[in-house]
Image (tube, rainbow, N blue to C red):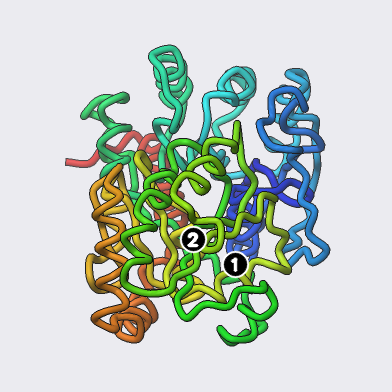
Amino acid sequence: MKLTVVGPTHPFRGGISHYTSLLVRTLRRHHKVQFLSYSRQYPAWLYPGNNDRDPSAELVIREIPDRTFDALNPWSWREIVQPIREHQSELVILPWSVFYWAPFYAIFLQRLKRLSRQAVVFLCHNVVEHESSWLKSSVSRRILSLGDRFIVHSRWDKANLVHWLGDNRSDQVFVNPHPLYEHLGGKSLRKAEARKELGVNSERVLLFFGFVREYKGLRYLLEGMPQILSCGRTHLIVAGEVWGDGRPYLDLVRRLDLQEHVTFVSQYIPNERVECYFAAADLVVVPYVTATQSGVVQLAFGFAKPVIVGKVGGLTEVVEHLKTGYLVPPRDSKAIAEAVLDFYENRREQAMIENITQSRWRFSWDAMADTIEGIARGLRERIILADTGCSRA
């Protein structure tokens, strides 16, 4: 098949950049994939972190785009329609995550649909974004309605999308779990080595990883630490850049007298350092208060690490309670603490690691490729039937 993928890759940081690169790599094994990426994606004043460039010394994934364009220039979105037409793609795959892209996609899709027959597949990382509003939802709904097919990562998110698009489009929405992030491993670090490298000397280590944002619920984990510490020496590593004001977290640590038990690494973690943090941890805590899915969970599973997650959104479809991790009520510090204590007191680590290893097949990139291929075949069959004047009974 001939496919086109539009989205971020190196040198941009973040999970969606990694996701897009891994998707292109997988699809290129069997198909002719045109990859269009950005020279710029966000204006500096709008990006909430330090910058959107990946500081990693090791690239790990390098899928070179066929063409880059300035995603901040509306005219560039019109121009990329021509190379897509020349490639004769069966599908154009667009990532959807935040309302920011709505005006650019509107320009691109209106021109694409006016000039070609290429089908558009929205790959929805989030249907409804984390910091949503009526305006964002209204505009997002209009843009997504321009898609021909949709891939979401959970049945929960499918229900959100069908609510927007209408029940008559339900069969156009395909559910495929978020694939694993396994590409950042390879050094096979032992726990003791990793902890020594990080300067952590504790018999129990928890990890909170990724951008620190309000909806990720870090404060509830911090509030649960005194209860956790009452039953054994435990150290929490918070590794990730803070978006917004980080002082409330530091104030909470001081107020709860946790200075010796919490380490903040308040920066974007480069590729070559990611494995060290996961290798050092026994348990990864993802206490989200809202979510559709989580790349951090798939990263943890890629390192065979059990997780504690907030029982929200599509996360309940990914984590098997007491098998691959824990599902806890959102905003519940006591429940988080009790899950941590159960993990250690009942020695669940090895059994959970084995369960994660056995369930990896659910989260493969090949399965995602199969979903995309199935969508293409279905659309191709519809076109043939339409062109011959036939219809299904």
Q: Residue at x 26, y 49 (%)?
A: 311
Where is residue 207 drawn, in percent x and y? 50, 63
Give me the disc on residue 30.
1
Residue 331 position within the rendered picture, expressed as x and y whole percent measured from the top left: 30, 42
Residue type at tag 2: Ala
Q: Secondary structure at mark 1?
A: loop
Which residue lies at the image location 49% right of the left edge and 56% below the top edge?
258
Snapshot quadrant of residue 59: bottom right
Q: 23 left or right of 49?
A: left
State whether residue 379 appears in this view.
Answer: no
Q: Quadrant of the N terminus?
A: bottom right
| Residue highlighted by disc 2 | 369
Residue 298 image offset from top left, x and y in percent? 46, 62
Answer whether residue 13 is visible to the viewer in this image: yes
Spatial CA span between label 1 and label 2: 10 Å
Nearest the eye: 335 or 363: 335
The foreground one among 39 and 182 is 182
Residue 333 in the image: above or below residue 204: above
Q: Secondary structure at mark 2?
A: helix
Q: Residue furthest top?
A: 135
Seen from the viewer's position, the closer of residues 313 and 370 is 313
Q: Classify residue 5 as left or right of residue 338.
A: right
Residue 265, numbered circle: none
